[in-house]
Image (spheres, rainbow, N blue to C red):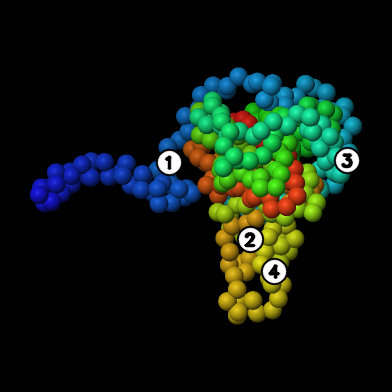
Amino acid sequence: MFRIFVIAVLPLFFVFSSEIFTFLSGALCPSCNCESAKPLHRIPRPQLRPEFLALENGTDARLGCEDVGYKMHVFSREPLVVYFENFVSAREREHLLDISEKVYTPSTITHNGGQTSDRNTKVRDSEVALVPRTEGVRCIERRAREVQGWREEVWIERLRVQRYNSGGHYSHHFDWSSGRGGWGRVSSFMVWVHGEELEGGGTEFPRLQLRGDKKKWCKFIECEDNLDGEDSKDKGVETAEDKKGAVFKVIPGNAVYWENFRSDGTGRGYNETWHAGLPVKKGVKVGLNIWSYGRID
């Protein structure tokens, strides 16, 4: 019986061998840049909705924005992940806390490319505030555009402040969905607004590979307590150099930025951007999401 099955199936394998190989390549190595990936089929630009996008009105040049003097550190080149020191000032953080206080609502989870949503505290337990576009908020929007090089056909989404009380968290997820038709959430900022006397609540990227001088990065990511000690490897202790993945500490004013999609014409998202907001053990964490929507190159 088994011999008959093999004889029947073998011709199908040769006919569809290319499709089978493509499927197995994606299943076994989803982050690989396979030559067989199909090119992106782009649809016309979707309608821009000002209730969700921070559209420019020609007056940004007249904004009285402060020079925050941020510093940039490249954490990863592919996907592009950049860490910022002092991305928002103390005055801007105070302003965000003030304008979000009265507009918080329970956070939800979106499905089907944003068509449906529901609340599930096992997956996401936080509050979200869609903040008004004050002059201070528009200055932060402008800064996010500048960092990205004023990309054509890319728009900043309305800024959202997220508040996590004790136990609050957001399980592992992608910020991008399908990138349907060549349009989607092309990049993300996670900006920490408040987190003094906080325990837990870091932002984890379990699939990112640590690069560079690990001891210097330990200012910004969680590392083993004895990383600076001598002979840690000789003692059999896992160091930052051995460990794959990163948990960014909650440092108010600082931020991490990442690209969500590959720029190879396929519209595929980076699996390395799988991330989570780890549970808050003590205190309150407040973060700012800056997402950019637009053309996937």
Q: Amino acid at mark 3?
A: Arg
Residue with the mark numbered 1: 37
Can see residue 204? yes
Q: Amino acid at mark 1?
A: Ala
- Left/right of residue 211 with respect to residue 22 in the rendered view: right
What percent of the width, then of the height, locates residue 90? 86, 44
Find residue 186 and report its image quarter.
top right
Judging depth in this view, the residue of 126 and 250 nearest the camera is: 126
Marks 2/1: CA distance?
A: 28 Å
Marks 1/3: CA distance?
A: 47 Å
Q: Amino acid at mark 2?
A: Arg
Report crowding for label 4: few under 14, some 14 to 19, many 20 or more residues within 10 A (C-alpha): few
Residue with the mark numbered 2: 211
**Residue depicted at x 45% and y 48%:** 30
Q: Earlier in the sequence, mark 1 or mark 3?
A: 1
Residue with the mark numbered 4: 225
